[in-house]
Amino acid sequence: MSVFKELSSLDLAALVASRVCHDIISPVGAITNGLEVLDEEGNEDMADFAMDLIRKSARQASAKLQFARLAFGAAGSAGASIDLGDAQEVAVGYMSNEKANLEWTMPRLLLPKNQVKLILNLLLLMNQCVPRGGTITISMEGDESAPNFLLKAEGTNARIPQVVSEILSGQEPERVDAHTVQPIYAVLLAGEAGLNIELEKDGDAVICKANTQVSESA
């Protein structure tokens, strides 16, 4: 896709950084608001509320940062592997602040880092498909040498956002910004990981498959 060829590594890094900052601005801002309430004299009745807000927002910011570190970060040197158990931990932490529930049924294995990063990025995409909440299930077939991943999002008015559908099908988005960079990044990860992504609507669910590419000589 031409947009990927034209997107420099510096632009990609800047857009991903903007996406991560966008995700943590809200909880960090809430912490700041809570501290301002505590600083106000004569507002003792709001102190408990402010502390609860600070604690909740701090946990949320921490969960988002830990998730981003694994989903977008280097996560080790080139060729490094990531434990699916670690990926599950950050995914559960991230989804604890979202409307949808997460069911992670994959075994605890060491997989190439780009495959694991792709799973986490696909989780973000599937979360967009159930904006009113529901259940997202992640499972795996095959073994470490040729894994196939299945993500299923079920919920009220489950849908595939148009921009996500377009990018995953190879179409160029109208513009590349912090909102569209995440599915672009997922497609780039899939290419590096040797996986094909398929996304489809199936009744009240959205199904995403990330299957190992089969070589022509196979």
Image: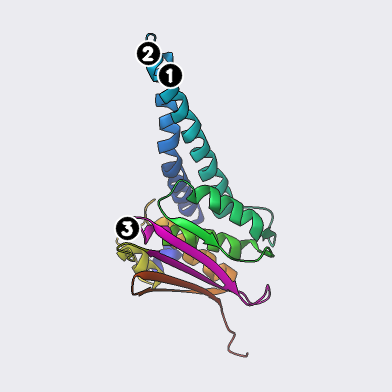
> Tag on residue 87?
none
Quadrant location of residue 88?
bottom right
> In this orientation, does residue 72 appear?
no
x and y percentages locating residue 73 in the rendered image: 58, 51
> Tag on residue 47?
1
Q: Which residue is mark 2?
A: 43
Residue type at the position of mark 1:
Ala
Is-magenta flag for residue 144?
Answer: yes
Residue type at the position of mark 2:
Asn
Which range is magenta? 127-154
Residue type at the position of mark 3:
Arg
Count the numbered circles shown: 3
x and y percentages locating residue 157 in the rendered image: 29, 63
Q: Is residue 72 above or below residue 193?
A: above
**Inter-mark Cα distance, 3 to 2:** 47 Å
In the image, what residue occupies the spot 40% across and 59% down? 134
Relative to 175, 73 lies left or right: right
Q: Residue furthest top?
A: 42
- Closer to the eye: label 3 or 2: 2
Classify the position of the C terminus by image quarter.
bottom right
In the image, what residue occupies the spot 39% across and 13% down? 40
- Closer to the eye: label 3 or 1: 1
Q: Are marks 2 and 1 in contact (CB under 8 Å)?
A: yes
- First in residue order: circle 3 vs circle 1: 1
Q: Which residue is mark 3?
A: 175
Of 34 and 175, nearer the camera is: 34
> In this orientation, does residue 106 appear?
yes
In the image, what residue occupies the spot 49% across and 73% down? 209
Of 172 and 211, nearer the camera is: 211
Q: Residue furthest bottom?
A: 217
